[in-house]
Image (cartoon, coloured by chain):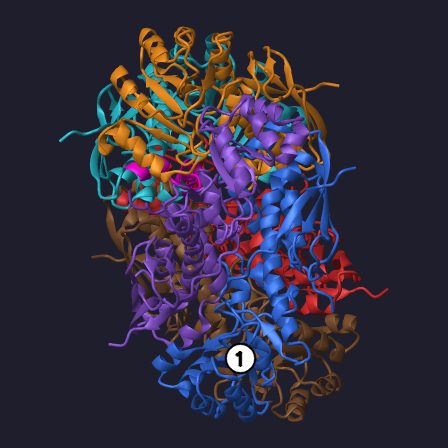
Chain colours: A orange, B cyan, C purple, D blue, E brown, F red
């Protein structure tokens, strides 16, 4: 199954806001003073470094909102890996419109490709282990749907999208509830039959308590590989296992080899550097 | 002059959108099932690494929007430097409200403090040179006003905020206009007397052409320190000089020492890793 | 665990839109012409028929948006059952503000209490069977979060909230995929570990195919009680079972007694008549 | 005069909000995982019960917002009566887009057709009497313009649209003003020459007081047919007469035969059950 | 009956938009750099010319949105006449907040008072004639509700608020319908019993045709006083009469003395010069 | 360089809001009752008085939002001068759509052309002096971007667009700062290198103090021509000079002849009467 694009309706307002931020109250003072509306041009978006592309449709929307007669032709699809120097897209039409939307389009494309690229690095590191790579809710404010999409472009899976689409019981909840069992019972009484339940445990004792009333997913937080391996054995397929904490490019493969089902990492969304992309004029 | 907070009206909608992203269509399934509205708690935001704080009022707004009776007390003001383990804020009130807003508040505070922290590193690196550190328009879509504020918190200055509040003539504009002189002339005819004009030049020849009709600011793009020094001499105070390109923690001081007025770097906004912050329960 | 209120942020805009609909471009022509701002009054909301109340905080918000000095005191909490003639809330403050917001507040309270009341009827009908009552996505456009909340007030559980928080594979999906097994496989490859998967089946053959790769929930669509009983036996606890189709007050108990886990009905949201509520002046 | 469609601008945002409710933060998880963007399909909307159709353009807008290349062809126009089994519309295009928008489109079409259908029942019941059927402000929050349109589709007339487009003096206003005469005088002094004035009266005495300074419309509230007949005689054409209260399919014809000009009923908007409509795949 | 304020909900977004226009992406650069948040100040709004005040609550909202601790005390109520030099309001609180909101608040207050002032001039000119002064739909885009309110502050009455709250049949409608009688018949068949109907006529022949099926209001367009007098006699109380066209301060009294009920003028909204107001620091 | 149109994205919402104001909750009651959707018509916008046109694209957007099949053909471009009776635009398409959007389109076009026309009068009055005419922030709330555009259409230049794109130090700032020098110093420390700084001075003493640390622009407020001339001599090219205060058609040329660079006037935006435009049916 190839990657399915997000419905435009889910990000069109985000693009509009970003353009409004940049156009302000006048539009592009420089371009409008210098470049007449009749000047046509041909540009290409080029990767200045290797990475995974995400956000082609978002970039297209930015150009579309500024000038209906700009043609944006993707050279590679979302989820593709590119090398330094590779063409990512071709953009032709009125030069003024293209230059006016350039920064907003590249800000989106660079940021989302950055998230996809970091995801890809983790995915590559665990290749062959059968373990999935998953994001978290530590996303950039306002960009959750897009960053989660970028994680999918990078070959990762998505964790829950918000506080409302799955349950995640953490230490503070357990403390107030008076224990894991009580917390799980309260949650089961409250939610519907399509809400997955996950519990975060820090110790083997907590894990064993949880197994007396297993839930859909257990998150093993900050456990070393040896303990993870033991936990996998103890769970024995009765719950999906997610490992989190101290996930880096150096540690992730060892974590994966313990047999956990998925590994989650916040930094692929909250600390991904932008993928360096440039807009080059195409000379005839 | 101490740092002035942004008017709330400039970011309240941004915070509201971020909360809407996280609360979805039900709110916090986990917390609402486990923690009654009468449970009070006391938490503190703690820095897990050293850095510069930005976004205290933004975090406060997130808690305020979820629960009017949450009290958010800043332990340090925006722009302050903290060390690992230092308390950043104290939050007390209904535990359910605090846990529900936690992630959104920390996503803002961590991201903005990350931008401030990267800015501070550059500012520290050029201390004593008299050169300013400046951001660019390479910001995260939707967060420009806040990231520009974070740059100020980190001791940096702001470049233009959008396409409409200053002119920046770049290579593509010059090419269409048929030269620097023509481009500047077109812009002067179009804009008002309060719009600053900047021109990007790549060579000493371009710089010399520009000096025949100087503008407010010249951007020297990707020039090595030796050429920058020469340029500073040639300009001789007739324009403000901005250096850009290849600005890293290792190069920035050498660039500053050439005598340029300001150095701009995009990565302090587009690639700043989040500052690691945690929410800890305060035991009585 | 008592019912938790929705965060105000999830419905404040809905209330604002409803008020805007009613106030139009001038406000309340009649009241403003007749009733001075100094006239204080005391009203009560009274149930004109028996039912289950839902929407007290929504009604409060409507009065709050029109007049900050109106006091809305709930006489019963959301989820309470009332008899005809019972007081639901007391409202005191400026008469003009109260009369201006009256219709919008009652439109919300009556509609949501109507949904809760229909839910309660089904819940009562299956009492003691251990079967839950669940809503669907057949909600009134714009009111999904509130109607789902009203279902919870009525003692029901929620089905998925949208197309994005759980998977429901139906006949059209199966047809395109070329069978249940292929459809389930495609979905598993695409979604994360916290997304529950449900499949709709119409026949015992389909059910048996599904059991070769069981999912979280199976929806048995339009099956008679005898077949439902057989299906419950066949599934034997390996999936949660939802029955749907032809659910009425007369049929629901027989369906529940087959041992299915939950029964879903669209009409409790899309066809619930309003609960008749009136606003009566309180004479001193 | 045939029924005129609502300007799209009046409901486009409502449709967008309803889609946003359903698509959430990812879109249609199920469909996007199973059905590729190249799969074309042909569906028809079929009435599962008899009724009056309203909302064809609203349904079209829902499909348009999800997929520009979906073709929605109405088989009958708004205001048409259909029988069970009759085709209402044909929809062809990408299967994924059609299935994604299906629920939202049918939620609108079913709800509005439900309102039109209830209206039609009342209109049919009074046929030949010359009395009009009218809605009230007891509408579903957020849907007033659409429900009022559906009432017109059903053959009814609209009452005022909000608090600002006509005056309706009720008992609470009369009590504060100190009588009908005083209330009418205050209103006349305040409103412009294009604002119609209606007064609600409960007794013949009130009616006679009102006739000393007649207004545009008198609402006779909860009067039995005998008293209505007397009132019609007393008014003698000097005001338009609206009867309200206790309006059912069994009572409405007797009320109409008293000679009142219009009869208003809130339940045609606030308690109309949805019209049962289904989406069937068209086999080639 | 004193003038009733508009519900805040009807203009709060308008004020917010106006502030957003002025604050841009940073807020008040000048004030925030110079004036610390602790500096308190006391200002007064002073009329620099005579006029009628409208918009006190709108100005208050502007200050409130920028700084919750600003106190705005009206010295005169909306609808009051002031002389040059008279104090209109006192504003005290943080100097920075007051200076930041000053321009937006005065732009509203000056514009609305300008509309009220022009209205007052016409109202004064017809004093004693019993004729009302009315606005039109020729309002400034985005400000209709506020300008209509300002007309009321100036002693005028409001014409219809939009295309949807009353019918106004003009020449183009009559031409398409094939005559006044046909046009009126179509409209009567379409609208509800609370919608007032007005017809514009240019000649005595049209007026006589209209009287064969009179409507609520007739607009006599561009008729000289002699013809207006004749028309008043012909109508003889069977319709409300509105005169429009060529209404100036010199002509309005003669028009009023013909006995028409109301006179409408577009320029009191679309061409009213601002009332000159200033903000003066109050020295202790 | 010809005048560049505003990006549509900068005013589309403003037009939408204005249409929403006029269409209300039903649309055009009159037109929809009388004119069928099949009736085609041809209209022209005609200037009823001489002036400068601004807002053609805004008017086009109003017609586009109401009816996609309306064709709006500008007869003259924005910034053109027209004489009384001259055709401004031709509009053809469905008569109902054209009549429905007419008022909103003309309200925009008339208002913006009014601003352009007043600007042109000042520009004409100073022709040959080399002095520019500039607007202020005294704009109609909600219309700043459009009114500033209209000023450009009229041949004027724009002052700053808001509080955030340039610094303007006025008397209140100077008083709090304790003098011009201190105020300028605070501002320089706070703002970036692309923010122009202007200071308002009332006396020659203040001007001389300012010249000890000159800024980009000095505003000479309310000075008579003789003093302006002296100031021009004193400044001697070291700052751009703006004159403001008491600018009328009679005074402006004398002010310009003193040698100031630009003259600002608030009334060209806040008190410009609408340009009288009409919509005439084109007979075949």
- What chain does badge 1 belong to? D
Relative vertical location of residue D215 with respect to residue A62 in this rendering, above or below:
below
Q: Which residue is mark 1?
A: D243
Q: Would residue B135 appear left or right of F72 to someone viewing this image?
A: left
Q: Between C17 and C237, which is closer to the camera in this rendering?
A: C237
- Residue E225 falls in image quadrant: bottom right
Q: Quadrant of the N terminus of chain C?
A: top left
The residue range painted magenta reads B13-34
Q: Residue furthest right?
A: F284
Most frequent secondary structure within the magenta stretch: helix
Q: Would residue C159 appear left or right of A183 to someone viewing this image?
A: right
- Residue B27 falls inside the magenta stretch: yes
Q: Residue at x 60, y 57 (%)?
A: D112
Confirm whether residue F123 shows in the render: no
Q: Between A202 and B87, which is closer to the camera in this rendering?
A: A202
Relative vertical location of residue F190 with respect to residue F32 in this rendering, above or below:
above
Residue E48 picture location, percent across and down: 39, 65
Relative vertical location of residue C225 with respect to residue B44 in this rendering, above or below:
below
Q: Between A17 and E107, which is closer to the camera in this rendering?
A: A17
Label 1 element class: strand
Q: Would residue A259 appear left or right of F97 to someone viewing this image?
A: left
Q: Between F222 and C219, which is closer to the camera in this rendering?
A: C219
């Amino acid at each position: 199954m190839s990657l399915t694009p997000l419905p435009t309706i889910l990000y069109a307002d985000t693009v509009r806001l970003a353009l409004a931020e940049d156009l302000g109250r006048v539009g592009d003072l420089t371009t409008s003073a210098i470049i007449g509306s009749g000047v046509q041009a041909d540009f290409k978006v080029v990767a200045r470094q290797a990475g995974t592309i995400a956000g082609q449709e978002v970039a297209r929307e930015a150009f579309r909102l500024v000038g209906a007669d700009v043609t944006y032709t993707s050279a590679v699809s979302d989820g593709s890996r590119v090398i330094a120097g590779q063409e990512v897209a071709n953009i032709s039409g009125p030069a003024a419109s293209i230059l006016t939307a350039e920064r907003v389009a590249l800000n989106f494309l660079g940021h989302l490709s950055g998230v996809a690229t970091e995801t890809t690095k983790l995915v590559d590191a665990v290749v062959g282990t059968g373990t999935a790579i998953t994001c978290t809710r530590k996303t950039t404010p306002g960009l959750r749907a897009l960053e989660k999409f970028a994680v999918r472009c990078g070959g990762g899976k998505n964790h829950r999208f918000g506080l409302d689409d799955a349950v995640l019981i953490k230490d503070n909840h357990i403390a107030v509830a008076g224990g894991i069992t009580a917390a799980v019972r309260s949650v089961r009484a409250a939610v519907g039959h399509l809400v997955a339940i996950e519990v975060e445990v820090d110790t083997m004792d907590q894990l064993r308590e949880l197994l007396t009333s297993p839930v859909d997913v257990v998150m093993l937080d900050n456990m070393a590989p040896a303990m993870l391996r033991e936990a996998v054995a103890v769970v024995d397929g009765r719950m999906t296992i997610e490992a989190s904490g101290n996930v880096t490019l150096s540690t992730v493969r060892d974590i994966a080899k313990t047999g956990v089902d998925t590994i989650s990492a916040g930094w692929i969304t909250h600390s991904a550097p932008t993928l360096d992309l440039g807009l080059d004029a195409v000379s005839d």
